[in-house]
Amino acid sequence: MASNSSAVVQRKGHSLDPGGPGSKLQMDHLGTSERYSNSSRIMEEEDEEDEQPLRIIRSVRRGDGGGGSTSAAGSSRGLNGSASSNGVKGGSAGVSGRKVEGDAGADKKRLLGELRAGSNVGSSGTPVTKKVKVGAGVESKKKEPDPDEDDDDVPLAQRINNAKKTPPNTSTASAAKKIQDTSKPEKADGLSNHSSSNGPASPPMSRATTPKEGQDKKTRPTTGNSVPECDDSDDDKPLSHRKSQVGSNGASKESKTVMKDAKDITAKKRPAGPSNPTSDRHLEKKLKVVPTGQSSSKPPGSHAPKSGSLQSPKSMVKKEVTSLEKGTHKKNHEGDDDDDDVPLAQRITSGSSKPAVQKKAAKVDKDSDGEDDDDVPLARRLAASTPVKPKAVTPLKKPLSSSGKSATKKVLELRKKSKKVTNVTSVTKKTTKTITPRKSNGNQVISGGAQKWTTLEHNGVIFPPAYQPHGVKMLYKGKPVDLTPEQEEVATMFAVMKDTDYATKTKFIENFWNDWKPILGAKHVIRDFEGCDFTPIYNWHMAEKEKKKSMTPEEKKRVKEEKLKVEEKYMWAVVDGVKEKVGNFRVEPPGLFRGRGEHPKMGKLKARIYPEHIVINVGEDAPVPECPMPGHKWKEVRHDNTVTWLAFWNDPINTKEFKYVFLAASSSLKGQSDMEKYEKARMLKDYIENIRSTYTRNFSSSDMAKRQIAVATYLIDRLALRAGNEKDEDEADTVGCCSLKVEHVTTVAPRSLQFDFLGKDSIRYFNTVEVEDQVYKAIKDFKKGKQNGQDLFDKLDTSKLNAHLKDIMPGLTAKVFRTYNASITLDTLLQDTVGSNVIEKSADYQRANKEVAILCNHQRTISKSHSSQMEKLESKMAEAKQLLVDLKVDLDRARKGKPPLTDSEGKKRGGNPETLQKKIAQTEQRIEKMALDMSIKDDLKTVALGTSKINYMDPRITVAWCKRHDVPIEKVFNKSLLAKFSWAMNVEPEYRF
DNA sequence: CACTTCTAATCCGCTGGAGACAG
DNA sequence: CCTGTCTCCAGCGGATTAGAAGT
């Protein structure tokens, strides 16, 4: 039993290291209890009552089916190869810029979102790069047959910038420029109105153009208006291109302008756009303006479930807990997962549910001033503005923090009590980390501390099953070969990957052969790789797969249940008395290493891991997990409560690295660090102006190191680049800001920079951005006298950069800028929500989410079936439209008493006017929905929204937005996200990042 | 070292079309 | 014969997992 409260960890004030374990911020303002609602709930009673106070709204959708059981076959990837992946990720080429500007008339169609709108259709062609993922592993694949893929090459990054881009007005030369800042829409108004229906239907936005994707060209049977097309131009391009490129062809600009209303939208939004890091300023303005109704400063606790009422402690506890944890609560019991029927959304929404009306207020403001700023280069603006710290900005926070505390304490206490209730072991809840208040002046006290938990119990890890020889003989020079099980196992690993790109890569084959050869032994019949034919094994594998697939549902279910039964005990850990889900409790199965991109180690044998390789971390008083493999034992058992891992082993591929077993994302330990991450990013808000003015000042510093830091910081801030650590020879050749090489950045007169490099995971970052003159000049200087292959920032590395950043703000590192810019962008863009119903609002959200994804360069490959799917939709749309026309004719005739016409198949149509009218309405609705679906689909074909949602956008922004707009949270967060972000569910509707 | 971030692969429920059948 | 309803099933896409790659 232990220490209850003590569990709390304190952290010292040291600086936080970003990644570092110890770093934690304090979360002052969070509303207390709410914080950790997550995970764990011990099972005990989960009363359904939890319903908590709030729930009101209707629940939404179907029950997420959710697979409660997580398990799933974990087939080792190694074995199932399948999938042909294609490499191409990016979108098509074309350049487009997003056009800004809006015509007044625009309706709010924004549905489609600015994205589409923004995109310019007309842009003229542009560079087309082909594989997006260049170096990536994929690359070699010859182009996929699939048409879609090929084209899109334009990187995400580009698109981003466009957002800002050129002003409508400027026709001229500006066009030539690429990107940025310049533009701003003039008219704000157009936008604001929204028609009721909006969006969806309005396909009007015609996308005039033809689809860019090369292949697509397939006939699009139907109508022209399918919304989707227009954007294509943009969309096809790699994200990065989208925004920035605007100007690439001057002509296009203008034309674009004309395009759809979307522009307006864009315009509006634009200011906030990802590309403008400065958006926060707007924010500030807005904040001031704000709110009608609810005062922003509600005490944190206010939303909390009415625990206030007096009740027996126990009951109180329960309530608090439940309401907070709600979603997850029940989960603990395995079975329960599914049950959380209570939609979080309800709870959430209910709390606040006020119509969102207010939103717009701010808008105007924004448009007018905000926009202006945009034209001004960021730096300049900054410079102009006072260098002073903007603390004022965050009015909301402060109040919260103070009040929040006490509440928090309460909660904590409650929790402790609750613990007792549950008899789960002793322990206390860890929840209690202490929270230090943030000082009002912006200096925050950073709490830190090493202790992460007080008690920790778990069952260790589960190992993949031993290899089962199949006995299928591969061929060597046409003849069947006998292999020992060990040899066969490795051969099978390779055989199974036949239809992946890896199978054709020289490096992969070479590494595989080098690792397999010794297993075969010097005297083996197989002397070389060339004579090997793995087809028989491959066929066997495919047959097995087929067999598995064709099992009856009952069999599948049985298998699944059996697996679950075996794994169940490994799925949970008890941390400070609370049952928490474990993240990956399965040891990675042996296989061939699948490095991304042109990884030098791809194809190497990833050996099987045994207990002797594994170090277990468990509470001192807890039982040591039993070693599941008879006759083996753990390498070591530790009791280190300063770390959160439950186990780790050395990565067999990169022996210097480790693989860890952590708690799941929904655990409170993770939730807490997640929150701290966002709090740190929010803290940056108070320093950002100062930082910007500082680096702007140093653009022309005579000290080269200083200059490089200034420029690098600028790039990280503006473009959300990653830090760019140094990498070893045996790692993929990818870069980030600090590791950019001379050839990765090209200066484009008069003052633009073109970035083209492979970033994390070998995802291409291709973007052209207009920068301040000083930056442009500085980059030229940095390149001077250097050859390709040399570091652009030779006086800089990530540790120097981060050290510098830490001097400015405690705990600040390069990656914080990504979180900050992503969240502030989302927050700002969401202020422009104009949708009139849930569907439209969700579309608005997606649009904002998309901007963030573009900013972060989160790409995804266009699905192979994308174009055919779009065609199908289009033809359906055409059919529906024709039907509409026919129905109207019929209605007309019916009213005049004329007999109905016959349809194309000779059948009589018709009916009475009422029926017809009803059908017409239905059809119209269907068309609207289709148009919206199509546009969204097309819009998102190259953008992955998930990553930013999971890692970069403060969930409280989303939750608050849902509350303000009465959108059920389930519309934007799936079950996993709801669990992961349970700590954010109780924010007040007025929360601003 | 420890932990976060990311894309690809895989899983799995939902949607909607086809066919059978009833009214 | 026509229309509506229900079941079955394939395909689509969102949800999850895996595990690589960053910080």
Image: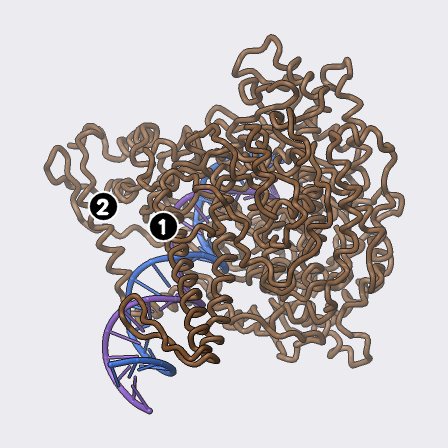
Chain colours: A brown, B purple, C blue
Q: Tell me if residue A277 comes above or below residue A705 in the rendering.
A: below
Residue in front for this viewpoint, A221 or A6: A221
Q: Position of residue A94 (x, y in %)?
A: 48, 34
> At 31% from the left edge and 28% from the top edge, which residue is drawn?
A506
Mark pair 1, 2: CA separation: 30 Å
Give the left or right position of residue A768, taking residue A28 as reference: left
| Amino acid type of the residue that numbered disc 1 sits on in the rendered structure | Ser
Given the current orientation, which residue lies at the most extreme top position?
A785
- Mark 2 Cα within 10 Å, few/some/many (few <14, many 20+)? many
Where is the N terminus of chain A found, in terms of image quarters? bottom right
Q: Viewed as shown, does residue A297 lie left or right of A201?
A: right
Tell me the chain of label 1.
A
Label 2 secondary element:
helix
Label placed on residue A868: 1
Tell me where residue A470 appears, x and y as whole percent: 21, 51
Q: Is residue A454 above or below residue A520?
A: below
Q: Position of residue A600 (x, y in %)?
A: 41, 28
